[in-house]
Image (cartoon, rainbow, N blue to C red):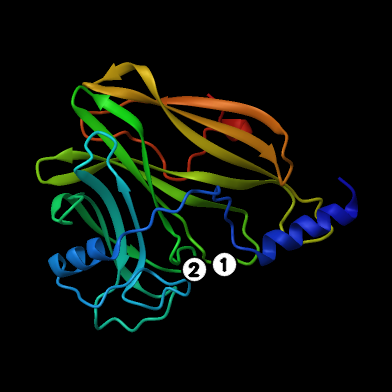
Amino acid sequence: MDRFKRIFLALALCLLPFSYSEARQAQPCEDAMLQSLSAQLGQRGWSSPSENAQGPLVAAACKPWPDDPNLSVVTLAYRDAKDSSSPGDRNLNWLVAKVDTHSGQLRERYDDYLGEDSALELDAGSLWLDTARYRLAPGVRAFGVVVSSVARGASCPDASSNDLLTLVVPEGAKLRPVFSTYLHAWTTVKGTSCVMDSDFQSEQADLTLAIAPTRSHGYADLLVSARVRAGQDENVLRTVSTTVRYDGNQYPFKQYATFWKREEQP
Protein backbone atom coordinates (compact mmCIF):
# COMPACT_ATOMS: atom_id res chain seq x y z
CA MET A 1 0.00 0.00 0.00
CA ASP A 2 1.52 3.32 -1.06
CA ARG A 3 1.77 6.38 1.17
CA PHE A 4 -1.29 8.11 -0.34
CA LYS A 5 -3.53 5.09 0.29
CA ARG A 6 -2.28 4.78 3.88
CA ILE A 7 -3.07 8.43 4.52
CA PHE A 8 -6.53 8.11 2.94
CA LEU A 9 -7.38 5.04 5.03
CA ALA A 10 -6.18 6.65 8.25
CA LEU A 11 -8.27 9.75 7.60
CA ALA A 12 -11.31 7.64 6.77
CA LEU A 13 -11.02 5.78 10.06
CA CYS A 14 -10.69 9.06 11.92
CA LEU A 15 -13.69 10.77 10.31
CA LEU A 16 -16.26 8.02 9.85
CA PRO A 17 -18.19 5.94 12.38
CA PHE A 18 -17.35 2.24 12.37
CA SER A 19 -20.14 0.40 10.58
CA TYR A 20 -19.96 -2.53 8.22
CA SER A 21 -23.69 -3.30 8.44
CA GLU A 22 -24.73 -5.45 5.53
CA ALA A 23 -27.56 -4.39 3.26
CA ARG A 24 -30.59 -5.95 4.91
CA GLN A 25 -34.18 -6.16 3.86
CA ALA A 26 -36.49 -3.72 5.62
CA GLN A 27 -38.55 -5.13 8.50
CA PRO A 28 -41.32 -2.53 8.95
CA CYS A 29 -44.03 -2.76 11.59
CA GLU A 30 -47.64 -2.15 10.62
CA ASP A 31 -49.28 0.82 12.27
CA ALA A 32 -51.89 -1.35 14.01
CA MET A 33 -49.10 -3.43 15.54
CA LEU A 34 -47.33 -0.32 16.84
CA GLN A 35 -50.51 1.11 18.34
CA SER A 36 -51.27 -2.17 20.12
CA LEU A 37 -47.75 -2.42 21.51
CA SER A 38 -47.64 1.22 22.60
CA ALA A 39 -50.89 0.78 24.55
CA GLN A 40 -49.58 -2.34 26.30
CA LEU A 41 -46.36 -0.52 27.21
CA GLY A 42 -48.16 2.51 28.63
CA GLN A 43 -47.20 4.70 25.69
CA ARG A 44 -49.20 6.59 23.10
CA GLY A 45 -48.84 8.52 19.88
CA TRP A 46 -46.42 6.13 18.23
CA SER A 47 -45.70 6.20 14.53
CA SER A 48 -43.07 4.46 12.46
CA PRO A 49 -39.59 5.69 13.38
CA SER A 50 -38.33 8.57 11.27
CA GLU A 51 -34.85 8.92 9.86
CA ASN A 52 -33.86 11.52 12.46
CA ALA A 53 -35.32 9.33 15.26
CA GLN A 54 -36.81 12.32 17.08
CA GLY A 55 -40.13 10.68 18.03
CA PRO A 56 -40.75 8.55 21.12
CA LEU A 57 -40.30 5.37 19.06
CA VAL A 58 -36.66 5.54 17.99
CA ALA A 59 -36.27 2.19 16.19
CA ALA A 60 -38.48 -0.80 15.42
CA ALA A 61 -38.46 -4.05 13.48
CA CYS A 62 -41.16 -6.70 12.98
CA LYS A 63 -41.00 -10.06 11.23
CA PRO A 64 -43.27 -13.13 10.91
CA TRP A 65 -42.20 -16.07 13.05
CA PRO A 66 -41.21 -18.87 10.63
CA ASP A 67 -42.64 -21.68 12.79
CA ASP A 68 -46.12 -20.19 13.26
CA PRO A 69 -47.94 -17.74 10.93
CA ASN A 70 -50.02 -16.54 13.88
CA LEU A 71 -46.93 -15.18 15.64
CA SER A 72 -44.45 -12.41 14.87
CA VAL A 73 -41.22 -11.31 16.50
CA VAL A 74 -40.64 -7.64 17.24
CA THR A 75 -37.98 -5.41 18.70
CA LEU A 76 -38.43 -1.78 19.73
CA ALA A 77 -36.28 0.98 21.16
CA TYR A 78 -38.33 3.79 22.67
CA ARG A 79 -37.96 6.56 25.17
CA ASP A 80 -40.21 7.57 28.00
CA ALA A 81 -42.72 10.31 27.23
CA LYS A 82 -40.92 12.80 29.50
CA ASP A 83 -37.44 12.04 28.12
CA SER A 84 -36.23 15.03 26.10
CA SER A 85 -32.59 13.94 25.88
CA SER A 86 -30.76 14.43 22.61
CA PRO A 87 -29.66 11.48 20.44
CA GLY A 88 -26.47 10.06 21.91
CA ASP A 89 -27.54 10.84 25.48
CA ARG A 90 -30.75 8.83 25.75
CA ASN A 91 -31.47 5.83 27.98
CA LEU A 92 -33.82 3.91 25.70
CA ASN A 93 -36.24 1.18 26.68
CA TRP A 94 -35.56 -1.96 24.65
CA LEU A 95 -38.19 -4.62 24.01
CA VAL A 96 -37.67 -7.97 22.28
CA ALA A 97 -40.83 -10.05 22.01
CA LYS A 98 -43.03 -12.61 20.34
CA VAL A 99 -46.52 -11.27 19.70
CA ASP A 100 -49.83 -12.35 18.23
CA THR A 101 -49.63 -11.29 14.59
CA HIS A 102 -53.28 -10.19 14.36
CA SER A 103 -53.81 -8.45 17.71
CA GLY A 104 -50.27 -7.43 18.62
CA GLN A 105 -50.76 -8.98 22.06
CA LEU A 106 -47.47 -9.70 23.78
CA ARG A 107 -46.71 -13.39 24.35
CA GLU A 108 -43.06 -13.75 25.38
CA ARG A 109 -40.83 -10.78 26.08
CA TYR A 110 -37.45 -9.51 27.17
CA ASP A 111 -37.03 -5.96 28.48
CA ASP A 112 -33.79 -4.07 28.90
CA TYR A 113 -32.24 -0.66 28.32
CA LEU A 114 -29.93 0.70 25.63
CA GLY A 115 -27.91 3.51 27.15
CA GLU A 116 -26.50 5.74 24.44
CA ASP A 117 -23.01 7.17 24.71
CA SER A 118 -20.07 8.05 22.47
CA ALA A 119 -20.04 4.48 21.08
CA LEU A 120 -23.78 3.77 20.87
CA GLU A 121 -26.45 5.86 19.17
CA LEU A 122 -29.57 4.55 17.47
CA ASP A 123 -31.55 5.73 14.49
CA ALA A 124 -34.61 4.36 12.71
CA GLY A 125 -32.66 1.52 11.06
CA SER A 126 -30.65 0.37 14.07
CA LEU A 127 -32.68 -2.75 14.94
CA TRP A 128 -32.88 -5.93 12.84
CA LEU A 129 -34.33 -9.38 13.54
CA ASP A 130 -32.46 -12.58 12.69
CA THR A 131 -34.78 -15.61 12.40
CA ALA A 132 -32.26 -18.11 11.04
CA ARG A 133 -32.73 -21.73 12.12
CA TYR A 134 -31.13 -21.48 15.53
CA ARG A 135 -32.61 -24.77 16.78
CA LEU A 136 -30.67 -25.20 20.00
CA ALA A 137 -32.59 -28.15 21.45
CA PRO A 138 -35.75 -30.15 20.70
CA GLY A 139 -38.59 -27.63 20.81
CA VAL A 140 -36.22 -24.69 21.42
CA ARG A 141 -35.62 -22.26 18.57
CA ALA A 142 -33.75 -19.07 19.35
CA PHE A 143 -33.88 -15.86 17.35
CA GLY A 144 -31.54 -12.94 17.22
CA VAL A 145 -31.66 -9.16 17.41
CA VAL A 146 -28.91 -7.04 15.88
CA VAL A 147 -28.31 -3.56 17.30
CA SER A 148 -26.36 -1.29 14.95
CA SER A 149 -24.88 1.99 16.15
CA VAL A 150 -24.62 5.19 14.13
CA ALA A 151 -22.41 6.94 16.71
CA ARG A 152 -19.25 8.54 15.41
CA GLY A 153 -17.20 6.98 18.19
CA ALA A 154 -13.65 7.96 19.10
CA SER A 155 -11.83 10.20 16.65
CA CYS A 156 -8.72 8.01 16.36
CA PRO A 157 -9.54 4.58 17.80
CA ASP A 158 -7.22 1.59 18.15
CA ALA A 159 -10.14 -0.78 17.53
CA SER A 160 -13.90 -0.74 17.25
CA SER A 161 -16.96 -2.93 16.71
CA ASN A 162 -20.59 -2.77 15.60
CA ASP A 163 -23.71 -4.83 14.96
CA LEU A 164 -24.25 -6.50 18.32
CA LEU A 165 -26.12 -9.79 17.89
CA THR A 166 -28.06 -11.16 20.86
CA LEU A 167 -29.76 -14.57 20.77
CA VAL A 168 -32.82 -15.12 22.98
CA VAL A 169 -34.71 -18.31 23.88
CA PRO A 170 -38.20 -18.77 25.35
CA GLU A 171 -38.52 -19.32 29.09
CA GLY A 172 -42.15 -19.32 30.14
CA ALA A 173 -43.62 -15.88 29.43
CA LYS A 174 -40.16 -14.40 29.05
CA LEU A 175 -37.31 -14.46 26.57
CA ARG A 176 -33.84 -15.04 27.94
CA PRO A 177 -30.59 -13.91 26.29
CA VAL A 178 -28.10 -16.77 25.92
CA PHE A 179 -25.45 -15.43 23.53
CA SER A 180 -24.13 -12.04 22.45
CA THR A 181 -21.30 -10.80 20.25
CA TYR A 182 -20.44 -8.08 17.76
CA LEU A 183 -20.64 -9.27 14.17
CA HIS A 184 -18.15 -6.74 12.82
CA ALA A 185 -14.90 -5.58 14.37
CA TRP A 186 -11.53 -4.15 13.48
CA THR A 187 -8.25 -3.74 15.29
CA THR A 188 -4.93 -2.01 14.75
CA VAL A 189 -2.10 -4.29 13.64
CA LYS A 190 0.62 -1.66 13.25
CA GLY A 191 1.02 2.07 13.78
CA THR A 192 -1.67 4.51 14.87
CA SER A 193 -4.79 5.60 13.04
CA CYS A 194 -4.91 9.26 11.96
CA VAL A 195 -1.12 9.58 12.20
CA MET A 196 0.09 9.89 8.64
CA ASP A 197 3.67 8.74 9.18
CA SER A 198 2.93 5.72 11.40
CA ASP A 199 2.64 3.11 8.60
CA PHE A 200 -0.83 2.28 9.93
CA GLN A 201 -2.21 -1.22 9.28
CA SER A 202 -5.46 -2.77 10.47
CA GLU A 203 -7.47 -5.95 10.18
CA GLN A 204 -11.23 -6.36 10.27
CA ALA A 205 -13.38 -9.43 10.89
CA ASP A 206 -16.92 -10.30 9.82
CA LEU A 207 -18.43 -12.95 12.11
CA THR A 208 -21.04 -15.56 11.25
CA LEU A 209 -22.86 -18.04 13.45
CA ALA A 210 -23.80 -21.68 12.76
CA ILE A 211 -25.22 -24.59 14.73
CA ALA A 212 -22.61 -27.30 15.42
CA PRO A 213 -23.56 -31.01 15.43
CA THR A 214 -22.37 -31.44 19.04
CA ARG A 215 -24.19 -30.56 22.27
CA SER A 216 -23.35 -29.35 25.76
CA HIS A 217 -25.77 -29.31 28.69
CA GLY A 218 -28.61 -30.15 26.31
CA TYR A 219 -28.07 -27.24 23.90
CA ALA A 220 -26.34 -27.34 20.52
CA ASP A 221 -22.82 -25.93 20.42
CA LEU A 222 -22.34 -22.76 18.36
CA LEU A 223 -19.70 -22.45 15.66
CA VAL A 224 -18.51 -18.85 15.37
CA SER A 225 -16.44 -18.10 12.25
CA ALA A 226 -14.56 -14.93 11.35
CA ARG A 227 -13.55 -13.88 7.83
CA VAL A 228 -10.55 -11.63 8.34
CA ARG A 229 -9.45 -8.98 5.87
CA ALA A 230 -6.69 -6.38 5.83
CA GLY A 231 -8.09 -2.89 6.31
CA GLN A 232 -10.56 -2.09 3.52
CA ASP A 233 -9.24 -4.86 1.27
CA GLU A 234 -11.96 -7.19 -0.03
CA ASN A 235 -9.65 -10.21 -0.16
CA VAL A 236 -9.96 -12.61 2.79
CA LEU A 237 -6.65 -13.19 4.57
CA ARG A 238 -7.89 -16.10 6.66
CA THR A 239 -10.96 -17.72 8.13
CA VAL A 240 -10.85 -18.60 11.82
CA SER A 241 -13.48 -20.57 13.73
CA THR A 242 -14.14 -21.39 17.35
CA THR A 243 -16.76 -23.53 19.12
CA VAL A 244 -18.82 -22.08 21.98
CA ARG A 245 -20.48 -24.50 24.40
CA TYR A 246 -23.55 -23.87 26.52
CA ASP A 247 -22.70 -23.92 30.24
CA GLY A 248 -26.23 -24.62 31.47
CA ASN A 249 -27.18 -20.94 31.58
CA GLN A 250 -25.60 -19.20 28.61
CA TYR A 251 -22.95 -19.43 25.91
CA PRO A 252 -19.92 -17.75 27.52
CA PHE A 253 -18.37 -15.55 24.84
CA LYS A 254 -16.88 -12.08 24.65
CA GLN A 255 -19.03 -9.42 23.04
CA TYR A 256 -15.87 -8.07 21.42
CA ALA A 257 -14.43 -11.37 20.23
CA THR A 258 -10.66 -11.64 19.87
CA PHE A 259 -10.21 -15.26 18.76
CA TRP A 260 -9.63 -14.14 15.17
CA LYS A 261 -6.59 -11.96 15.97
CA ARG A 262 -3.24 -13.36 14.87
CA GLU A 263 -1.84 -13.94 18.34
CA GLU A 264 -5.10 -15.43 19.68
CA GLN A 265 -6.09 -17.96 17.02
CA PRO A 266 -7.17 -21.31 18.52
Residue 178 in picture, x, y percent from top left: 28, 39
> 53 left or right of 44?
right
Q: Are marks 2 and 1 in contact (CB under 8 Å)?
A: yes
Q: Is residue 146 above or below residue 157?
A: above
Residue 17 in picture, x, y percent from top left: 59, 62
Q: Quadrant of the N terminus?
A: top right
In the rendered structure, which disc, 2 or 1, sits on the residue that comes first in sequence?
2
Residue nearer the viewer, 255 or 168? 168
> 36 left or right of 244?
left
Residue nearer the viewer, 3 or 12? 12
Residue nearer the viewer, 154 or 78? 78
- Residue at image mark 1: 152
**Residue 42, image quadrant:** bottom left
**Residue 226, image quadrant:** top right
Amino acid, disc 2: Ser
Q: Nearer the viewer, mark 2 or mark 1?
A: 1
Question: Residues under labels 2 and 1: Cα distance?
Answer: 7 Å
Point 29% across, 27% down: residue: 135
Q: Which mark is residue 118?
A: 2
Q: Is residue 22 above or below residue 34?
A: above
